[in-house]
Amino acid sequence: EDQVTQSPEALRLQEGESSSLNCSYTVSGLRGLFWYRQDPGKGPEFLFTLYSAGEEKEKERLKATLTKKESFLHITAPKPEDSATYLCAVRSGNTGKLIFGQGTTLQVKP
Amino acid sequence: DVKVTQSSRYLVKRTGEKVFLECVQDMDHENMFWYRQDPGLGLRLIYFSYDVKMKEKGDIPEGYSVSREKKERFSLILESASTNQTSMYLCASSLQNSPLHFGNGTRLTVT
């Protein structure tokens, strides 16, 4: 069964304290892994797509990496404005469906 | 930039009312989706559409229907609203196999 698990559920960091969010997946034939950022009361905002193991993408303080079983979203020297819920989703090669994880809620304190 | 616009940010309806949620995208995307998002349950797919006048059931279609008469517009219909349909509703669009782009959501309360 296709499944996506994100950990931790919640993460509190001090400003400048780097950390990583995890997205573990089991899927039949990965056709893309997607990271989104969601602010309270808003829709998810697309961040990155990764397609194959070893691929990396960067945007400002965020870096996403992919292996055959999991993806990490690394946050370097975070700022309070990075506080949000980060969602991971994978597209199944069998069904074409997008399966979302439950998200990690990040709080960065000044 | 892709823009997905949902007609209402907040909506309050009474049990039994027929409710229409409207979504418009401006990027000529063929795929459009309706999700609902609830605490602890994450994002769940209600319906999706790969083309005009075409619709497919998602994971939780019961109590909902959809309409896609034009490529840019995808409507979600609650035939007879119930309190368990109180939720955040998110519309999204995409090209084939590309990332989904979401609207800002409609928070629906059914009393």
Image (cartoon, rainbow, N blue to C red):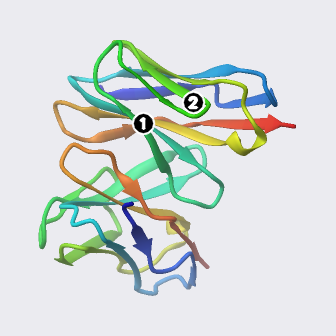
Q: Is residue A9 above or below residue A98?
A: above
Q: Position of residue B80 (x, y in %)?
A: 40, 80
Question: Is residue A16 shown left or right of residue B81?
Answer: right
At x 35%, y 69%, the residue is B63
Residue on which disc 2 sits: A62
- Label 1: chain letter: A
In the visual, does A80 lie left or right of B48?
right
Left or right: residue A51 compared with residue B42: left
Q: How many marks?
A: 2
**Residue nearer the viewer, A80 or B74:** A80
Dot 1: what SS? Answer: strand
Q: Sequence-wise, which precedes: disc 2 or disc 1?
A: 1
- The reply to whether dot 2 and dot 1 touch (C-beta < 8 Å) is yes
- Residue at 52% across / 58% down in the picture? A43
Q: List the residue tagged with mark 1.
A: A48
Whole-angstrom CA distance, mark 2 to mark 1, is: 10 Å
* Looking at the image, residue A15 lies above or below residue B96: above
Query: Residue B21, how many percent across, how many down?
Result: 41, 77
Residue shown at 62%/42% (left/top)? A85
Location of residue A90 (image quadrant): top left
Q: Secondary structure at mark 2?
A: strand
Q: Nearer the viewer, residue A41 or B55?
A: A41
Residue in the image at 56% along x and 37% along y: A103
